Amino acid sequence: RLPACDALLYLAPPPDAAAPDALARDALGVRPEVAAQRAQVAAAEAGVKSAWARLAPQISASASYFASDTRFPTGEKDGWRATLDLVWPLYDGGFRYGKRRQAEAQLSAARAGEEAQRLAVIQEVVDASRDVSVALERLRLADAQRKLADDAAASARRGFEAGVASSLDVIDANDRLYLADSGLADARARL
């Protein structure tokens, strides 16, 4: 049976160079702030399309039917009308062109925000992966230090029983064992 610390070391996957890349891809797919930035880019792209559409001519059609109690000069009491209108403003003081440039600037800002968010998520994943690797190494070192402190304490007790070491040596070795236990607990908590 493995001690608790050794079991933790064997259960944790060993850090490898490819793991952060795969984790970053997974994180980019599920993080809500990345999805929000993608939605802002899509909205900004729609704004650019809308701004370009303002430059196109506008066409409208309408139809109406009417009736009257008195006869019209044509002799009929009812009639209808249909219209087809084409409006194409040639000059509006630069308003449409300004709106188009504004929409393109908003798209650029949204794309920059998306890239910044993407890089932030990747950096968080890489940092977290590194932190796990460091925590695993600290745990391994704390476990080794704990074993050495345990051996030193047992040796000091045997030396005291044989009359070779003083009680101060035993107390010092037990103090080091306590500190090693604290370091091991701290390493487990960090992991």
Image (tube, rainbow, N blue to C red):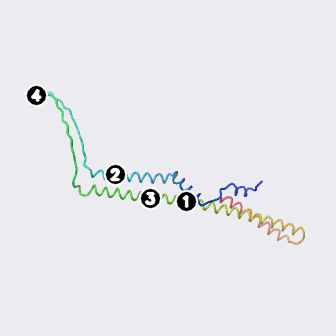
Which secondary structure lies at badge 4? loop
Residue 19, position as x, y percentages in the image: 59, 57
| Three-letter code, disc 4 | Gly
Residue tagged 1: 124
Dot placed on the residue nearer the N-terminal end, 3 or 1: 3
**Residue placed at 18% from the left, 35% from the top?**
81
| Three-letter code, disc 3 | Gly
The answer to whether the residues at label 4 and label 3 have Cβ atoms under 8 Å apart is no
| Three-letter code, disc 2 | Lys
Q: Name the front one of labels 2 and 4.
A: 2
Q: Which mark is residue 162?
A: none
Dot placed on the residue nearer the N-terminal end, 4 or 3: 4
Which secondary structure lies at badge 1? helix
Which secondary structure lies at badge 3? helix
Tell me the crowding category of disc 4: few under 14, some 14 to 19, or many 20 or more residues within 10 angstroms, Cα based: few
Residue tagged 3: 113
Residue 125, position as x, y percentages in the image: 56, 58
**Residue placed at 78% from the left, 53% from the top?**
1
The answer to whether the residues at label 4 and label 1 have Cβ atoms under 8 Å apart is no
Dot placed on the residue nearer the N-terminal end, 2 or 3: 2
Tell me the crowding category of disc 1: few under 14, some 14 to 19, or many 20 or more residues within 10 angstroms, Cα based: some
Dot placed on the residue nearer the N-terminal end, 4 or 1: 4
Q: CA distance from mark 4 to mark 1?
A: 83 Å
Residue tagged 2: 49
Q: Which mark is residue 75?
A: 4
Residue 27, position as x, y percentages in the image: 54, 54
| Three-letter code, disc 1 | Glu
**Left or right of 95, for residue 182:** right
**Residue placed at 67% from the left, 58% from the top?**
189
